[in-house]
Each structure stands twice: as C-alpha cells, then as structure tokens.
Image (cartoon, coloured by chain):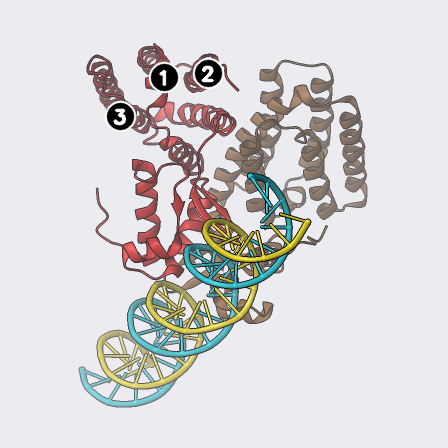
Chain colours: A red, B brown, C cyan, D yellow
Amino acid sequence: MTEAAVGSKSQQAYDAVKARIVEGTYTPGYRLVLAKIAEDLGFSVVPVREAIRRLEAEGLVKFERNVGATVSGIDPTEYLYTMQTLSIVEGAATALSAPLIDAVAIERARAVNEEMRECLDHFDPVRFTTLNQDFHSILFEHCPNPHILDLVHRGWNRLASLRSSTFRFVPGRAQESVREHEALLQLIESAADADTIEKAARQHRAATLDAYLSTAKNQ
Amino acid sequence: MTEAAVGSKSQQAYDAVKARIVEGTYTPGYRLVLAKIAEDLGFSVVPVREAIRRLEAEGLVKFERNVGATVSGIDPTEYLYTMQTLSIVEGAATALSAPLIDAVAIERARAVNEEMRECLDHFDPVRFTTLNQDFHSILFEHCPNPHILDLVHRGWNRLASLRSSTFRFVPGRAQESVREHEALLQLIESAADADTIEKAARQHRAATLDAYLSTAKNQ
DNA sequence: AGGTACGAAATCGTATACGATAACTATGGC
DNA sequence: GCCATAGTTATCGTATACGATTTCGTACCT
C-alpha cells in the first residue's frame, strides 16, 4: 500500500500531510506551520509549501495570505455542498460504470456489503466507512471516465475529516445504506437502464445528506 | 475587469499564465520554462513554479518531473472526458439554479442568445463562444452550490484552448445550440420539473460532443 | 479599568544559489 | 554510414537567507 517509488519531496510532503488529515491526526482547525512540518519531515519549507497549496486546491486546507494554513473544517454548509456534488458525480460514475461491471465484481461488492452489515452488529463505524468506499470503488473499477472518478475521490477526501460521523449521529441510516447497496447491485445485475441506476445511486448519497439535515435541525 | 488588488506574486503568475493559455498565446504543447516566465514577469522562479503547479492541478498544464511543463493539449479522449463531465455538472448546475432564475435574468439570457444568433450571420466564432459562456453564466448566477459551479468553470477552462473549434468544425451545431438555448429558457420559464431541465441541459452539452464524434470519425 | 499604541516574535513570501536530473551534441568505434 | 557512449548544456528541485506582514504581548495614556 505504501508507495515504493517515492516521488519528489514536494510529493512526499503532499502525501504525508494528506494522510495525516485523512487519518485524523490533523483535525479541522489544526494550524499547519510550514517550518514545523518541514522540520518534521526533514525537508525545507519550499516543497512543503507547494504541498500545502495543492491540498488547498483540493479543499482540504485553508490558506490565508501572510497568516498560514489550517486544516479546513467542514461546516454544515460545506457539508451540504460536498454531499450534493458527490451525489451527482457518484450517480454519474455509477451509471457510466454499470454496464461494465461483471458478475465477479458484483459478488465481491456483495461480500463487502455483507461485511458492512456485520460492522453494524459490532458497531465499528471506522471500518464501516472504509468498506463503504471499497464497495463503491469496486463498482467504479471500470469507470470509463477518469475525470468523474477523480471528482468522486475529491469528495471522499473532503468528507474524510468527518469520517463515519453519519453512522454515529444519524440513527438507522447505516442500516438503510446497506439495504440500498443490495438494491443497487440488483439494478446493475438486471441491467436496468442508465437513468434508473443513476437516480438510485444519486439518491443513495442524497439520503444520507437528508438524514443528516433532518437530524441536525440546528443551523 | 483587471483586478485592482493584485495578490501575491504567485497569484499574479497564476493569473498571467492562465490568461495566456486561455487566450491562446500559449498553445498546446508550448514549453513553459520556469526561468523564462519568471524573467518575463520580473519574478523569481519560486512563485512561478507554484503557479504552474496550480495550473497543473486544473489540467491546463502538464508537468513532468525534471523535464518541465507544457501547455496540455486536449486529445480526443480528453475532450470526451471533459465534455462528458461538463454535461453532467452543467446539467446539475442548471437544474439547481432554475428555480432561482427570475424573469429579468431570463430576458438578459434571451438577449445574449439573440446576439449569438447574429454571430452566426457574421461568422464570429470567438464572440459566439464568449457569449455562450455568458448565456450559461446568467443562468448560474444564483446557483446554490458553488462547488458545482467551480467544476463547470474548470471544464470551461480546459476547453479554452479549443475555443470555438466546434463552431468551426461541426456544421450546423451552432445553429442547433441557439435553438436549444431558447428551448431551455422556455422550460425554465414554465417552471418545468428539475429532472426535465437537467436532462435538457445535459443533452445540450452532450449533443455538441456527439456532433464532434460523428464528424471526427478518425480516431 | 479599558482601550490604544508601540514593539517583539512568529510566520509567511520571495530571491538567490547550488546540486540533481534529463536532454542534447559531438565524438569514436564498428 | 550508423549506433553507442561520454561530455555538455539546459532545466528542474530544493536549501538557505532575508525582507514583509501579521499577530500577540506589554506598557502607557485616558
């Protein structure tokens, strides 16, 4: 899983900081001081700076001129924007991929979904979220449009700092999600038309957003 | 139109190089030598480098390690990816915006579309393309999701180096486009449901792609 | 006591310098 | 005459250094 071919230092810095954000080592609001990170990694500030700016472009980091960078939190508004965008690009990615998903992949996805169901019993939100991405990644394996896939991954990264929060805070949504996965697989198996699949996949993501919104009536 | 508050030098470099690419001063394949650009702008290479990497993230520039940066062309495959993605995000942006478009905006859009029709007579592809973006920008003025709007703009930028090529190379498509604009406005005026509007907007972009594909049977 | 102004510390932004890498060129061998 | 190889050049990648800007703390004034 770890990259053998470590790229340039700016690439290493990018990977390292991104990993810390996604894993939750750096939590939202965390102050990213260039000199400090550079020292930690044993680099100078220039490549670190470049890495931070790249993360900024992806929305993981907020950068203020002459002030510095912080891990960007994701307020309710941003969450809404991100989830809405994800619902659209995931819907498209699923619909485009569907005709290319073979029976083997379906079974692999089904197995992952089964594991997710088990996570509900053991109450393992972190693993649940990982498996959820695995599930959809299997469906996207042969996605014919890498640009759209890239947008999906960007959305996932942006949600990373909130990892599994929905599972924790929105009662019942995880159970529903597992059921929707199975329904989605059946649609794909039965070669439903692209529009039906797109709507289902889109709704799958939108339902999580709706559940969040109706729970968090505040703001 | 020119920004009064010039930002940091890296920002200026970003704007300058981006403008040259979008305007067509730097054509695809053009070699972007950091030191040369830095000298032109009167900066040192560090901020220029940062600007180039940002443009790379947006897909406008291709960067090879220890080799350098070139303005990224857009081959037929990339064109397909970009147009397909655009059709999805423009469709979504239009559908989300539609309920918020007032009668005044509709009339402004209609006026722009009328100008586009005139461009067909004078054969002015450059202005046609500009107006086309203006037309859609009016519709997106109150788009409730800035993330999606950002994706639209990224797509437009990527297509910039091909500016108006469709108009030139696909006979009749521009005329069709103007008609589709009017149809779209009428859908919005009549408060058609989101799904209908989304499909129309999506199809509007997809049709241009289809026209291109059927014309350029090569490759 | 509260607010303002000044000064010090922290941090960013950029320039310059140099080492590393890849592309190019010329030379020699086959 | 062509290919391989060594040397040269161009360009990138990063380190270091310093000036610019902001922030924070302190002292002074009202």
Q: Please determine whether, in this image, residue D21 is positioned above or below residue D19.
A: above
Mark 1, secondary structure of its residue: helix
Separation (CA) of disc 2 from disc 3: 21 Å
To which chain does the residue with label 2 belong?
A
Q: Badge 3: how crowded within 10 Å, few (<14), some, or many (20+)?
A: some
Q: A69 or B169: nearer the eye? A: A69
**Residue A127, numbered label:** none
Say which label, 3 or 1, has the lower sequence index: 3
Q: Looking at numbered disc 1 in the image, what kind of residue is underneath it?
A: Phe
Discs 1, 2 touching: Cβ within 8 Å: yes
Q: Which residue does the image show at 42% across and 28% down from the upper left?
A: A93
Q: Looking at numbered disc 2 in the image, what kind of residue is underneath it?
A: Ala
Q: Nearer the viewer, mark 3 or mark 1?
A: 1
Residue A207 drawn at (x, y percent): 44, 15
To which chain does the residue with label 3 belong?
A
Q: Which residue does the image show at 67% across and 33% down from the upper left?
A: B136
Residue B218 drawn at (x, y percent): 50, 44
Residue B11 drawn at (x, y percent): 56, 55
Mark 3, secondary structure of its residue: helix
Q: Which residue does the image show at 50% across and 14% down from the upper left?
A: A217
Mark 2, secondary structure of its residue: loop
**Marks 2 & 3 on one chain:** yes
Q: B46 or D10: nearer the eye? A: B46
Q: Please determine whether, in this image, residue B85 is positioned above or below residue A14.
A: above
**Marks 1 & 2 on one chain:** yes
Separation (CA) of disc 3 from disc 1: 13 Å
Say which label, 2 or 3, has the lower sequence index: 3
The answer to whether one can see residue B219 in this image is no
